[in-house]
Amino acid sequence: MDAEAALAYQRLLVEEKYDDSNSQLLKQKASLIRLQNNVAGFETNGILTKSSKGEQKPKEL
């Protein structure tokens, strides 16, 4: 393998690693948004209520 081909191959490997880590970050961000939406849904449905100390606790069923 000549030097130019070796450099192109290394560049390809770096790009793949970057794409993979970027993909992981996007998946984590989507997961976090889903969690935030779930909590917001619980709050609007009255499942979470504020205690006297201002802490959130599950409502008694």
Image: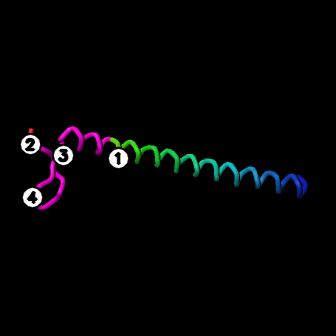
Q: Nearer the viewer, mark 2 or mark 4?
A: 4
Q: Which residue appears farthest toward the front when viewing the image?
A: 44
Indicate which disc, 2 or 3, sits on the residue closer to the N terminus: 3
- The total of numbered circles placed on residues is 4
Q: Quadrant of the C terminus?
A: top left
Q: By what rule are the colours in the image chosen?
A: rainbow
46 or 9, which lies in front? 46
The kind of residue tagged 1 is Gln
The residue that label 4 is drawn on is 52
- x 71%, y 51%: residue: 13
Give me the C-alpha separation between circle 2 and circle 1. 22 Å
Residue 3 horizontal/vertical position (percent): 89, 58
Q: Which residue appears farthest toward the bottom when viewing the image?
A: 53
Residue 51 horizontal/vertical position (percent): 11, 55
Give me the C-alpha separation between circle 3 and circle 4. 13 Å
Give me the C-alpha separation between circle 2 and circle 4. 15 Å
Q: Which residues are magenta?
A: 38-59
Indicate which disc, 2 or 4, sits on the residue closer to the N terminus: 4
Residue 28 horizontal/vertical position (percent): 46, 48
The residue that label 2 is drawn on is 60
Indicate which disc, 4 or 1, sits on the residue closer to the N terminus: 1
Circles 4 and 1: CB distance less than 8 Å? no
Give me the C-alpha separation between circle 4 and circle 1. 23 Å
